[in-house]
Amino acid sequence: MTGSAPPGRAYLIAHWQAGDSDPIPVQFNPTEMTLEKRVQFAEIAIPGLTAPLQQFVRGQAEVLTLELFFDTSDKGTGAVATSVTTETDKVYSLARIEPSGHAPPPVTFHWGKGFPGENLASELGGQRRESFTGTIVNIRQTFTFFSGGGVPLRAKLALTVNEYKTMREQLDELNLSSPDRTHGHLLSGSDQLWSVAQRYYSRPGEWRRIAEANGLADPRRLAAGTRLAVPSIDSGRRGR
């Protein structure tokens, strides 16, 4: 990538098989964009309860929708008019199949500081972002002004972009804890064994397993900065 977008201008990067494209600036920054994120839960019906339990199943792809405006009428509207497709086709290309990849390329939308998701809670680890990467699943071009000779001079492009992340990227971001693996935990001043057990096992009552694994004579007296071994549930059961 050798080019750069004008300061403050939103732009797209295409992730082609051969490498990333130069920034593709939008002609005018969008006046509105929408981000929609859904998560899927299953209802677990337990007889005798007043409501079913909610079991997290998976996240669904986040969806970015925005409308871009393009206009080349300032270059003339007569015989020498410049078609607005000289701008819009740069974006439309990103919804076409790349022969070497057998699919349209993923794209990343960038637009300044404070991008939605940049200030996520610290508890979410590596899930913060400064841009949005996805695949264009819908593009609608509306041409609204033409020269006398039929050259399109103004257009609106409505884009729908579905979140795109490889499995490796998602696992690295989530850094999920597993009760089936041994973990190390550095105690903070507010930690109690039950809270550590809740974090790694989702079972606060399993604090005794951690106390036994670390030879803690008095589990109520914990020193901040101490590194605890948090044994896996499976290995702990085998040892019982």
Image: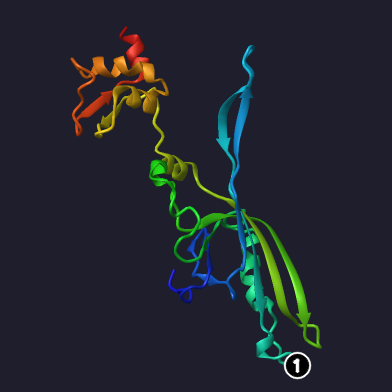
Could you say where residue 196 lies in the image, as x and y percent from the top left? 33, 26
Report crowding for label 1: few under 14, some 14 to 19, many 20 or more residues within 10 A (C-alpha): few
The residue that appears at 35% across and 17% down in the rendered structure is: 206
Could you say where residue 25 lies in the image, as x and y percent from the top left? 54, 72
Q: How many marks?
A: 1
Could you say where residue 88 lies in the image, as x and y percent from the top left? 66, 72
The residue singled out by tag 1 in the image is: 79
The reply, left or right, for residue 122 in relation to residue 159 is left
Q: Quadrant of residue 202?
A: top left
The residue that appears at 50% across and 45% down in the rendered structure is: 166
**Image color mode:** rainbow
Query: What type is the residue that disc 1 sits on?
Result: Ala
Q: Quadrant of residue 161?
A: bottom right
The residue that appears at 19% across and 34% down in the rendered structure is: 225
Point out the image quarter for the C terminus.
top left
Toward the viewer: 182 or 101? 182
Point out the image quarter for the N terminus.
bottom left
Toward the viewer: 157 or 217? 217
In this rendering, the answer to whether 232 lies above or below 154 is above
In this rendering, the answer to whether 150 lies above or below 15 is below
In this rendering, the answer to whether 2 lies above or below 178 is below
Toward the viewer: 190 or 31? 190
In this rendering, the answer to whether 197 lies above or below 77 is above
Q: Secondary structure at mark 1?
A: loop
The residue that appears at 52% across and 56% down in the rendered structure is: 132
